[in-house]
Amino acid sequence: MTCVIDASVAVKWFVEERGSTAARTVLSKGEPLLAPDLILVETSNTAWKKVRRKEMTREQGEAMVRVLPLYFDRLVHSDALVVRAYALANHLNHPVYDCLYLALAELEDVDLITDDERLVKVVSLTEYRHRVRAIERGLR
């Protein structure tokens, strides 16, 4: 089953933290994975922060940045999603950059798998609640 993956999940493919096992299970299924191209910027920024905090080496961060695009079947240009993401952000009162992932999931009629608890909570009482799955539930 094709799904959209956000940066909170993709980082867990490379870094051991809560949810990493579940994130790697999603990856190991070999199903088609999609994301907005923003994921490259978000995960690269996370790698940079982790290097600065000495949670990973520069080489590990660079490897993460180089390899990540290979894990996706398709990266969608944000310009194709930003108008809908903006509308979703206003509707949900949630940041546009997170709503890019939701806009892609909506466009492709697939689920978004995330470890962003705020996003899961925001959509929990909306029509998008069935579109967004927390990583721990993303293994069905």
Image: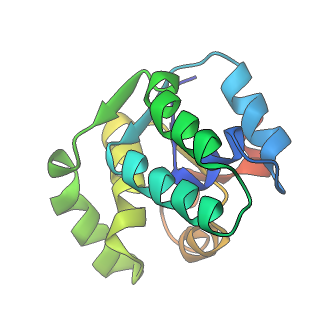
Residue 12 to residue 115: above or below: above
Depth check: give the residue in front, 109 or 94.
Answer: 94
Left-right relation of 123 to 23: left
Report the residue at 67% width, 58% height from top.
115
Left-right relation of 10 to 45: right
Residue 86 to residue 25: above or below: below
Report the residue at 60% width, 56% height from top.
8
Q: Position of residue 19 (x, y in %)?
A: 81, 51
Q: Position of residue 126 (x, y in %)?
A: 51, 70
Specify the quadrant that holds the C terminus. top right
Depth check: give the residue in front, 64 or 4.
Answer: 64
Report the residue at 23% width, 70% height from top.
87
Query: Residue 31 falls in which quadrant of the image?
Result: top right
Query: Residue 104 falls in which quadrant of the image?
Result: top left
Report the residue at 39% width, 84% height from top.
93
Residue 93 to residue 14: above or below: below
Q: Position of residue 135 (x, y in %)?
A: 72, 49
Q: Is residue 10 visible?
A: no
